[in-house]
Image (spheres, grey):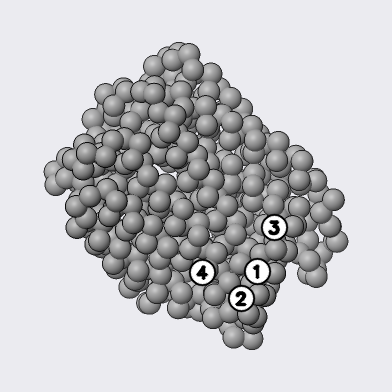
Amino acid sequence: MNPRAAAASGTAGNGSAWVILALGALSAVAPVSIDLYLPGLPQIAGELAGGDARAQLTLSAFLLGFGIGQLLHGPLSDRFGRRGPILAGMTVFTAASVGCALASDLDSIIAFRFLQALGGCAGPVLARASVRDRYEADHAARMLSLMMLVMSVAPMLAPMLGGQLVALFGWRSTFWALALFGAVCVAVTAVAVDESLPPARRAGGSPAQMLRDYGKLLSHRQFMGYTLASGLVFAGMFAYIAASPFVFITLYGVAPQHYGFLFGLNVLGIMLMGAINGRLVVRLGAERLLRWGVTGAALAGTALAVVGWTGWGGLVGLMIPLFGFISTIGLVAANAMARSLALFPQRAGTASALAGTIQFGFGALSGAAAGALADGTARPMTLVMGVAGLASLAILHLLVRRGPVSAPGGSGPSSRAP
């Protein structure tokens, strides 16, 4: 039974449990790379005398590189397969992590973080495309949700581990840990991940064709609706990621080694929503659950902005709407990606790349905005998150009409973007 048929029957073929675990680990490249070093960010700013705003550029550079790199890895994987680009990209990631650990100034860290992201983004973008190679429609959303559960272990444990590493060995140890993670990912891919895109299904084409493919995606109203709505929720999350070390550690006096426990509480929300999504998505559909998630992000973001502006409730008052907002990622991410990829099944790598680029591009902008607006309070972070949640809801309603969406030229009811 081929993997797509196995998925349709509700079973897991081709050793897919191990494949999902491996792809989940590859999908964790971004959260591990971000969350592991976050507890050391104030220490980096102090030791290298760059200031908080400049230290946050190490995050923005990573997000920018992660976005740009996907634009290359996606089309290349549609043409040459998934496995080779993953191995090459994760090798670059490992080498750049060593460069970060040895850097002596902030400019060098910013440059190596950009290079680290260019290589590392091959993991998640091609993992998503590999799921689309194997599974159809809402079953792909279910598999992406299961993959997210595996991936969510990383942002829960990484900041805790990072906090302990920073407390015991200093911030450089977090980058040595990332180098080790990259080497393990290379080994796991070589052993456990088979090629999901056979030569007969690979796309040909020149660089000009690649640009035309991106043009089709950018002009497709429904694809952009799903992608922008998801990207804006991610923008809110990345504003939180960029600013929370300073809000929790500097503003509220949380010890660096305890920062990860607060961060982990929000990750539990993502895991809970991801588990619920995995159970319900085949029955209720990715479209409905996506709309529920985006609506929740708008409501929680609005509450968060009010709490951040008034200071009501202190740290506890801030954590409640934060938990609500971050939890919606468990509903938004997998469902938006599944709906986007279903529109272009023959260009899953390219579509996954563009969606990821927009997500991380928004993340880079929101993280930089939170840093530029930093005033020693939680207001900039919460304001950016509130605006992102409301904008996501507005975009989804404006660009995506309700009802089933079929892939162009694929099976199922025809549904063109209005």
Residue 279 in percent (x, y) is at: 60, 49
At a point 44% along the width and 29% down the height, the residue shown is: 373
User: Distance between the Cα atoms at labels 3 and 2?
Assistant: 17 Å
The answer to which of marks 3 and 4 sits earlier in the sequence is 4
SS class, disc 1: helix
User: Distance between the Cα atoms at labels 1 and 2?
Assistant: 6 Å
Q: Amino acid at mark 1?
A: Leu
Residue 158 in percent (x, y) is at: 32, 47
Mark closer to the observer (1, 4): 1
How crowded pointer 2 is (Cα within 10 Å; few <14, some 14-19, many 20+) is rated as: few
Q: Label 2 belongs to which residue?
A: 207
Q: Label 4 belongs to which residue?
A: 73
Q: Is residue 177 left or right of residue 74?
A: left
At a point 36% along the width and 60% down the height, the residue shown is: 116
How crowded pointer 4 is (Cα within 10 Å; few <14, some 14-19, many 20+) is rated as: many
Q: Are marks 1 and 2 in contact (CB under 8 Å)?
A: yes
The answer to which of marks 1 and 3 sits earlier in the sequence is 1
Q: Label 3 belongs to which residue?
A: 218
The answer to which of marks 2 and 4 sits earlier in the sequence is 4
